Image: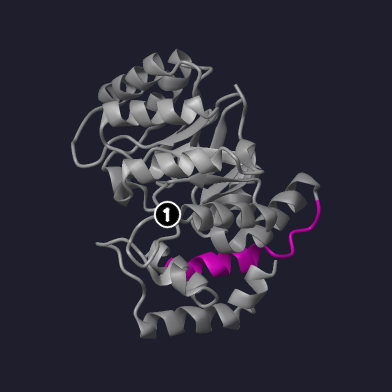
């Protein structure tokens, strides 16, 4: 089992004017945020609009992503409710030698911890060589992992269940499992999480905060004074006033208009919101130009 440590972005998907996935630019985006400081990137998480992108487009991207210079740094999100489609999509990714997956329990339906364990059991039965990061985000799936359920999954599958992305924030302070990655979903939880023994973060806003987040992480590991953590948290707070996907696309669109494209029913920020976002970031001395050049 390979533990995941460091700063990971929930990478964005780049959408063409005709609402198809721009595979080349989506991969370039992921490579750029790694160049800017991330240890890696999660592809087709919620920030990547995974539930809204077709399976055929995902497969097309996987085929090209397998040729990326950072192939070993990606965690593959499935973004599917269907168990069979999840297993089939993982089969494609596995055929291209991707091993790590970010998988959320299905949305819409209500179910118990036992049902969740059964869901992941079926996946692991089909792909016993995979490594899975559980995606804990009750706001999206309607289900919230608890400490006992995660521990039971790790007990049953110690080689396959390697970590959890905690975007519900009910685990990162209390979950302690040896050689298991706990990764909060916000920069505001990064430093506290590291102090509690967490492994890093996987977040939407690391698409823009990669350099700052990496410095906080490195300074913690090297036991240096923290000089940018407050700014990192302040930037996160600015983005949290909006839908994160909409805000991130608005931010990036200041340098490349293709980022204004977003899949319905999601939408870009309106002009007033966009101005407010950019103005508030500039008050923190955090701008699109400085970020893109990082």
Q: Is residue 26 toward the left or the right of residue 109 in the image?
A: right
Residue under circle 1? 47
Q: Is residue 216 above or below residue 129?
A: below
Residue 90 as seen in the image, left or right of residue 281? left
Q: Is residue 10 above or below residue 106?
A: below
Tell me if residue 170 can be seen.
Answer: no
Q: Which quarter of the image is occupied by the N terminus?
A: top right
- Taking the spot 58% from the left edge, 82% from the top edge, the residue there is 282
Q: Seen in the image, is 195 located left or right of residue 124?
A: right
Q: Residue at the location (33% across, 18% down)? A: 122
Image vertical order of residue 123 relative to residue 100, above or below: above
Q: Nearer the viewer, residue 245 or 6?
A: 245
Q: Main secondary structure of the magenta part?
A: helix
The residue lying furthest to the left in this view is 109
**Crowding at label 1, few (<14), some or many (≥20) Cα neighbours within 10 Å?**
many
Instruction: State the SS at label 1.
Output: loop
Q: Nearer the viewer, residue 226 or 58?
A: 58
Q: Is residue 267 left or right of residue 189?
A: left
Residue in the picture at 41% in, 39% down:
59
Closest to the observer: 13 or 187? 13
Magenta residues, start to end? 224-240
Give the image location of residue 167, x and y in percent: 43, 47
Q: Residue at x 52, y 31 (%)?
A: 100
| Magenta region includes residue 107 | no
Image quarter in which the C terminus is found: bottom right
- Residue 236 is one of the magenta-drawn residues: yes
Q: Position of residue 197 (x, y in %)?
A: 63, 37
User: x and y percent of residue 156 in the render?
Assistant: 43, 14
Please state which of residues 40 and 107 is positioned toward the viewer in this rendering: 40
């Amino acid at each position: 089992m390979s533990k995941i440590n460091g700063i990971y972005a929930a990478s964005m998907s780049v959408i063409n004017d005709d609402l198809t996935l721009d595979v080349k630019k989506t991969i370039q985006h992921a490579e750029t945020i790694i160049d800017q400081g991330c240890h890696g990137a999660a592809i087709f998480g919620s920030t990547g609009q995974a539930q809204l992108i077709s399976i055929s487009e995902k497969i097309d991207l996987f085929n090209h992503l397998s040729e990326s210079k950072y192939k070993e740094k990606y965690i593959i999100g499935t973004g599917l409710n269907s168990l069979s489609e999840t297993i089939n999509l993982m089969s494609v990714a596995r055929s291209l030698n991707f091993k790590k997956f970010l998988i959320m329990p299905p949305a819409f339906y209500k179910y118990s911890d036992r049902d969740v364990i059964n869901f992941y059991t079926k996946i692991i039965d089909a792909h016993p060589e995979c490594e899975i990061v559980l995606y804990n985000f009750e706001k999206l799936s309607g289900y919230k992992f608890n400490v006992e359920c995660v521990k039971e999954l790790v007990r049953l599958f110690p080689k396959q269940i390697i970590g959890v992305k905690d975007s519900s924030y009910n685990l990162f302070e209390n979950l302690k499992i040896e050689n298991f990655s706990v990764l909060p979903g916000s920069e505001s939880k990064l430093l506290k999480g590291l102090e509690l023994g967490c492994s890093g973060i996987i977040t939407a806003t690391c698409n823009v905060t990669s350099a700052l987040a990496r410095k906080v992480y490195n300074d913690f590991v090297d036991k240096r004074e923290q000089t940018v953590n407050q700014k990192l948290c302040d930037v996160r707070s600015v983005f949290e006033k909006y839908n994160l996907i909409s805000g991130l696309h608005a931010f990036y669109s200041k340098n490349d208009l293709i980022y204004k494209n977003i899949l319905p029913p999601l939408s870009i920020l309106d002009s007033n919101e966009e101005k407010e976002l950019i103005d508030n970031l500039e008050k923190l001395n955090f701008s699109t130009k400085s970020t893109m050049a990082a």
